[in-house]
Amino acid sequence: MSGVVSVRGVDKVFGTGRERTEALRRIDLEIPQGAFVSLIGPSGCGKSTLLRLIGDLTQPSVGTIEVNGKTAHRARLDRDYGMVFQSPVLFDWRTVQRNVELPLEMTALGRTQRAARAAAMLALVELGGFERRYPWQLSGGMQQRVAIARALSFEPALILMDEPFGALDEMTRERLNLELLRIWKQTGTTIVFVTHSIPEAVFLSTQVAVMSARPGRILEVISVDLPQPRNDLTREDARYFGFITRVRERLRGHDVAPPRAAEVAASG
Amino acid sequence: MRRLRYYGPAVAIFVGVLAVWEIAVRAFGIQQFLLPRPSAIAAAFTEHFDELVTVGGNTLVEAVGGLLIGGVAALAVALATARWTAASRALLPFAIAANSVPIIAFAPIMNNWFGVLNPLSKMMVVAVLVFFPIMINTLRGLTLVDRSSLELMRSYAATELAVFTKVRIPNALPYVFTALKVSATLSLIGAIVAEYFGGARSVLGQFIITEAAFFRFANAWAAIVVASAVSIAFFLIIVAIERVAIPWHASSRSAESS
């Protein structure tokens, strides 16, 4: 199966001489079509840098990155990406609708088509009726939903999310996790998701890429084969806790066996 | 009712100060040429009303003209500087140094360049005076853009023109209006002081100088009242434009909205 993203032998070094920092070392990562991949690791491990490399916001020192069989640079020019940052990065001077339309303004789409697309995307994130509001009139969680609607608006092949729910309270975060999964299912898009929350990574992902401290390396890509679609019951599943333990121990540097069959059976 | 409660204290203080002023001048027998009574200033104001409106209007034209010339030049330079950052790094130290030159000292030079009777000489003093605050503020607004906003635009493969029109310029507008509000007051100061250095007769600066020379201080005070009123009006007009131009900005948000 050909990957949407294929990272091969990538190193990333910042600065030179005494300022030299090796951020990433020998990264290999294949992300299949329709996957939901989380990057997790200690702070400063370069997980955000890896996301930015995939999005062509910075370039690798060594190695290649392909997206949809093109260079990352070509993919960016072809507008294959939707980005969501930790802060919503909405423009105060635009209404919610005009914020969602922003990426479409870079395309040849006409005004009415843009408005229709924006309305559809806002309905998708359950913000129908908020088109005329300004960002500062919305709560933090709603603002981040607008940012997600904006990232989806030109139907990119790949959504890159950099700790999008990191600044939100626990309950809002859990609700948005469920919404994100629903949107992911509905649109069939591929998502790369940076987080520092182990439960969030396990709950959302089809694969969790566990990274080491600087220089960041991918220690293991853990396939989270919890049943789909995931819901509130998933969070109470024993296998869910099994995967959380596995990721946590991997982060700590222990090698642990995958959850034993007996445990899986007991929780089933 | 709420308006009364909001503005009531300010009005009370204003009336109170005038009353104390009036009573103090009478009680201590302060001479008219040192400090005229408010009632005498009011009388001078009504007596010379038509002339005061004319001179106030002429000075306002100089202030507005100067602000337009200086403002347009400042915006153009700020845009060019933000676009070619390498040039800005070389030029900015000179701009900051030039900003500390007391511009008003150039008034006689401007009279020489543009003609002492030509209102343009006064406008140019105002233009130079308001140029730096507007230019520096606009430049800050154009360059102090959230890094994530720029990365977002980059992820859309946005052109440099799109980054300017959709991010940098809207981001700069509140900074521009802040500078314009400061410059409104500054432009009137510049125009009046430039008028002190000579020129056409029927302007506020010359009116004040002439009346003071003939010890008609109540008239001079009446002209100062007009100058203040014009200055405040100019400021309020810019505030009104700001509310229409950038209704989304925090300074325009009403207290009711969350």
Image: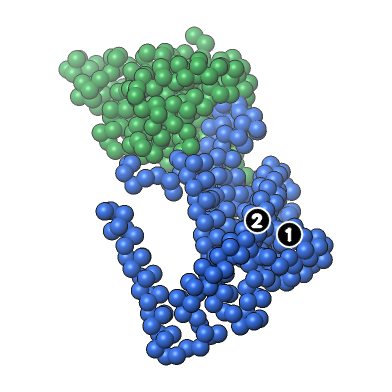
Chain colours: A green, B blue
Furthest toward the front, the residue is B47
Classify residue B254 as left or right of residue B71: left
- Read off the chain for label 1: B
Q: Earlier in the sequence, mark 1 or mark 2?
A: 2
Local secondary structure at mark 2: helix
- Residue nearest the viewer, comparing B198 with B33: B33
User: Mark 1 touching mark 2, by CB under 8 A?
Assistant: yes
Q: CA distance from mark 1 to mark 2?
A: 9 Å
**Residue found 57% across the figure and 79% down from its top:** B217
Residue B157 screen position, x and y as percent: 60, 26
Name the residue type under label 2: Val
Name the residue type under label 1: Pro
Whether A138 is drawn above or below A112: the answer is below
**Residue found 30% across the figure and 32% down from its top:** A173
- Read off the chain for label 2: B
Local secondary structure at mark 1: helix
> What residue is disc 1 on?
B119
- Residue nearest the viewer, comparing B250 with A150: B250
Asked if one can make out residue B83 in the rendered structure from this viewpoint, the answer is: yes
* Tag shown at residue B246: none
Whether B82 is drawn above or below B8: the answer is above
Crowd rating for badge 1 (residues with CA inside 10 Å; few <14, some 14–19, many 20+): many
> What residue is disc 2 on?
B61
Q: Are marks 1 and 2 on the same chain?
A: yes
Crowd rating for badge 2 (residues with CA inside 10 Å; few <14, some 14–19, many 20+): some
Classify residue A174 as left or right of residue B86: left
Quadrant assignment, res A146: top left
Residue B194 screen position, x and y as percent: 70, 67
Furthest toward the bottom, the residue is B28
**Residue found 64% across the figure and 71% down from its top:** B207
Classify residue A250 as left or right of residue B38: left
